[in-house]
């Protein structure tokens, strides 16, 4: 590309070639021309920056719209622990929650650890507009850390539920809640991983784990708040962080909303959670040596020791010494992983399995049953 030099600069070039000296006034004019040129270039850069920001704001505008849609359904929760005598303690647990509709009725979803030491009269729920109420009924499930609150008002604005099974690693998400008591705080990140389990969570009650991992900032007080996709749908309930400092270090965990809703439906309709059931006894000593003895190249999946007669596993033709490698498209890491996956699965759902048998992989379908009350979920 050719550029035309300013006339004064052309004259300067000619003059220099002829060995002429320029007076001070001429040099000043040339300096002014250079400054004008620089100023014009800066204006052009500002104009280009404005155009680039305008394009970026169209993307950021989506986030603003999501926040505007969802935050009215996010609540701040304070729960005063109840002493053994029934007297309320001055200490309080604080967290977040989100209003959703279950069977066309509004409920607040949150974490059990936010309200587990309290009871309905001592739980304070504050809405986005500042109004305060108390639940008239509370349900919770220790094994998943899910809690559900029923509020007196049936005319509540609810967030839309998404499908956590459709989430991809790398998908953008927002975490909304009350970190350190700062209500209606919003942070942005991505889904970092799926299927996290074996996390050390407090008192160890949370046995059924299949968490989403996110780098959206989650801090104390975010517990129970929603994880939102860019469609404005709730895809998880924020539950825990991995942190050496007690604050956000970019590793947070959320319960997938599909599991939360299934648990909430059971709690609010029958008062307890129906666990998924396969009907197998698993080999707790399955290790690399035993895996190689069965023909596997290394430790993978979990080995079936026995199959209960008439169980879903029996009807699916699972056999002792089968190694369950995949469950519903998810690679099975070990016995505890499979127990969590089965226990969190909807009763009656048909699940594809990949099983290692007689030194080859085969495909089976199993219809998940309802676990006996004393069963662990496998």
Image: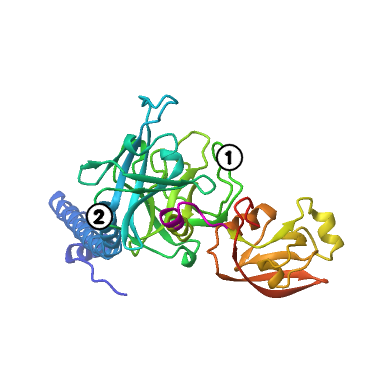
Above or below for 81 versus 193: above
Numbered badge on residue 82? none
Q: Position of residue 337 (x, y in %)?
A: 64, 55
Image quadrant holding the N terminus, namely: bottom left
User: First in sequence: mark 2 or mark 1?
Assistant: 2
Residue that numbered label 2 is attached to: 154
Q: Residue 89 at what x, y percent from top left?
A: 37, 25
Q: CA distance from mark 2 to mark 1?
A: 35 Å
Percent x, y for residue 259?
49, 58
Magenta span: 266-275
**Residue visible at 22% across and 58% down?**
46
Q: At numbered mark 1, what does the secondary structure look like: helix, strand or loop?
A: loop
Q: Which residue is mark 1?
A: 204
Secondary structure at badge 2 equals: loop
Q: What residue is drawn where x is 59% and y is 52%?
A: 373
Left or right: 109, with 196 as reference point:
left
* x and y, in percent, of residue 366 in the image: 64, 71
Question: Which one is closest to the eye, mark 2 or mark 1?
Answer: 2
Q: Is residue 367 above or below residue 80?
A: below
Q: In which quadrant of the rendered view does residue 34 lie?
A: bottom left
- Dot 1, how many residues are within 10 Å of its Cα: few (below 14), some (14-19), or many (20+)? few
Left or right of 92 in this view: 36: left
Instruction: Specify the color scheme.
Output: rainbow
Note whether residue 278 is visible: yes
- In front here: 66 or 272? 272
As for residue 200 lying within the magenta part, the answer is no
Question: Which one is in front, 250 or 230?
Answer: 230
Tell whether position 271 is magenta: yes
Camera sees residue 217: no
Label 2 Cα crowd, 10 Å radius (few <14 / some 14-19 / many 20+): few
- Please, which residue is most extreme toward the left here? 25
Marks 2 and 1: CB-CB under 8 Å? no
């Amino acid at each position: 590309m050719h550029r035309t030099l300013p006339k004064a600069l052309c004259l300067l070039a000619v003059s220099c070639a002829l060995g002429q000296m320029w007076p001070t006034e001429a040099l000043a004019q040339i300096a002014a021309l250079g400054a004008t040129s620089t100023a014009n270039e800066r204006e052009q850069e500002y104009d280009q920056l404005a155009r680039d920001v305008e394009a970026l704001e169209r993307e950021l505008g989506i986030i603003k719209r999501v926040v505007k849609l969802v935050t009215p359904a996010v609540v701040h929760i304070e729960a005063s622990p109840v002493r053994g005598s029934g007297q309320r303690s001055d200490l309080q647990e604080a967290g977040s929650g989100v209003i959703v509709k279950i069977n066309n009725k509004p409920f607040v979803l949150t974490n059990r650890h936010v309200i587990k030491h309290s009871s309905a009269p001592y739980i304070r729920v504050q809405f986005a507009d500042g109004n305060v109420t108390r639940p008239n009924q509370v349900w919770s499930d220790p094994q998943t850390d899910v809690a559900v609150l029923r509020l007196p008002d049936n005319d509540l604005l609810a967030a839309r539920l998404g499908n956590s099974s459709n989430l991809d690693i790398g998908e953008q998400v927002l975490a909304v809640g009350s970190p350190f008591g700062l209500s209606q705080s919003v942070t942005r990140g991505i889904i970092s991983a799926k299927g996290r389990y074996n996390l050390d969570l407090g008192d160890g009650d949370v046995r059924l784990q299949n968490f989403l991992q996110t780098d959206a900032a989650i801090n104390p007080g975010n517990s129970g708040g929603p994880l939102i996709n860019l469609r404005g749908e709730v895809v998880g309930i924020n539950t825990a962080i991995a942190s050496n400092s007690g604050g956000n270090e970019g590793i947070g965990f959320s319960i997938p909303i599909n599991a939360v809703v299934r648990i909430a439906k059971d709690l609010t309709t029958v008062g307890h959670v129906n666990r998924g059931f396969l009907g197998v006894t698993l080999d707790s000593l399955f290790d690399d040596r035993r895996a190689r003895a069965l023909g596997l190249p290394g430790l993978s999946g979990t080995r079936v020791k026995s199959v209960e007669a008439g169980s879903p596993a029996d009807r699916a033709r699972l056999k002792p010494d089968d190694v369950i490698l995949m469950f519903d498209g998810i690679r099975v890491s070990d016995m505890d992983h499979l127990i969590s996956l089965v226990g969190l699965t909807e009763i009656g759902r048909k699940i594809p399995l990949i099983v290692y048998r007689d030194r080859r992989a085969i495909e089976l379908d199993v219809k998940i049953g309802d676990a006996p009350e004393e069963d662990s979920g496998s």
